[in-house]
Amino acid sequence: MKFLPYARQTIDGDDVAAVVKVLRSDWLTTGPEVGAFETELAKVTGAKFAVACSSGSAALHLAAMAAGLGPNDSAIVSAVTFLATANAVRYVDAEVLFADTDPKTGISNADDFQAVIETHPKEKIRALFPVHLCGQTADMEAMSGLAEAHDLMIIEDASHALGTTYKTSDGREHAVGGCTHSDMAAFSFHPSKTIAMGEGGAVTTNDHHLYESLCLNRNHGMDCEPSHFINRELAEDADGMVNPWYYEMQAPGYNYRASDIHCALARSQLKKLDAIKARRRDLAALYSRLHAPLAPNITPLTWVENVEPVLHLYPVLIDFDAIGFHRASVMDKLRGLGIGTQVHYLPVNRQPYYRDRYGDSDLPGAAQYYDRVLALPFYPALTDDDVGRVVAALTGLIA
């Protein structure tokens, strides 16, 4: 019986050939594949600019730096997310305020962020970090209105949501990453995500100033633009010509560059995005149909209105008391049947570092979501029979 992990990459011959072509080329690190991938990602999302980098965590950090967050600033982060969303705020010495979530979706919406603003009137809040959990989005139209009312920046954690679209009140459709209702959107291309890059990420934006900051900070802060140089006596020769080797660092950046190897894989995967989207949507629909008889003990997530998601994960909400098993026991029993599962996520406000720094937070929606959530196997190579096997195993546990 083959083991079904909760997520995995899907690599075919085209992907292998794309990487091999780079290995046989003159470029391995940052070369033409990086720029080509950025151009194609910008086209897919509808953003003016895309900046590839070494991971989704790096993308969030770069976005926090570009936003100008720093000491004495605060940013509001959805409590149900991976560590990197909150950590990006701390990397720039700003403080984190956690927003509660909808217990049926795990998503923080504008009302949840508004509640944080109202209960922290003395905080210098500069930015909102909504998280598009599992591929579903927050209400970005409402989020944009909130940000405009309070002069806040929006950085979308879109790590789970490549390919997802949503409609606004005027009936228009928007792609996640197009930044119609945000300043920047950060993506992850970890092997478990919609497309795989190995390790990799990107930030999209429509703002040229933010774009320049993202590019500068992913490459050590090295600036090669002559008009920006400060040390003219070092930059120029005796005739006033710029020395061809010269560059400046006016503030430290990071080595967050992506390589041609990684971007070749990402480009190849991006070409298959439509097929990947279709398969993930078919799998989600099949899971939801087969799970229907298991309600109310096991239910899918509530679907967010006006969102056409490309799910990165397929979580279900389980009433563990009703079925008579603790979550760890369910996971162990399923693993014994060759089925991998995972929990996404322990609310970040409950991590020791953040509890020590900010104390306990009363976030009942996030707690309810966490208490019930379990992610099931979900990736394009999963067959319909595999899905049936997973649901049959859960049905057996309930019985």
Image (spheres, rainbow, N blue to C red):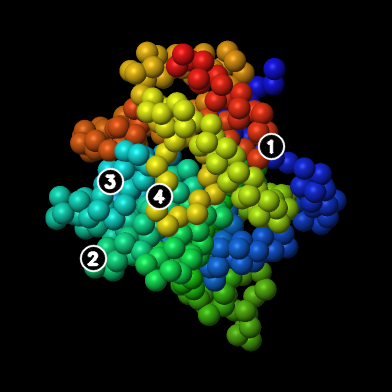
Nearer the observer, 332 or 40: 332
Residue at label 1? 381
Residue at label 2? 150
Q: Which circle, 3 or 1, is nearer the viewer? A: 1
Quadrant of residue 10 within the rendered picture: top right
Nearer the observer, 20 or 345: 345
Nearer the observer, 230 or 91: 91
- Label 2 sits on what residue type? His
Q: Residue at x 32, y 38 (%)?
A: 103
Confirm or deny contact between disc 3 and disc 1 (CB under 8 A).
no
The CA span between labels 3 and 4 is: 18 Å
Q: Earlier in the sequence, mark 2 or mark 4?
A: 2
Image side of residue 15 versus residue 93, left or right: right
Q: Residue at x 51, y 15 (%)?
A: 396
Q: Can the viewer see residue 210? A: no
Q: Which circle, 4 or 1, is nearer the viewer? A: 4
Q: Earlier in the sequence, mark 3 or mark 2?
A: 3
- Label 1 sits on what residue type? Ala
User: Which disc, if any, is residue 99?
Assistant: 3
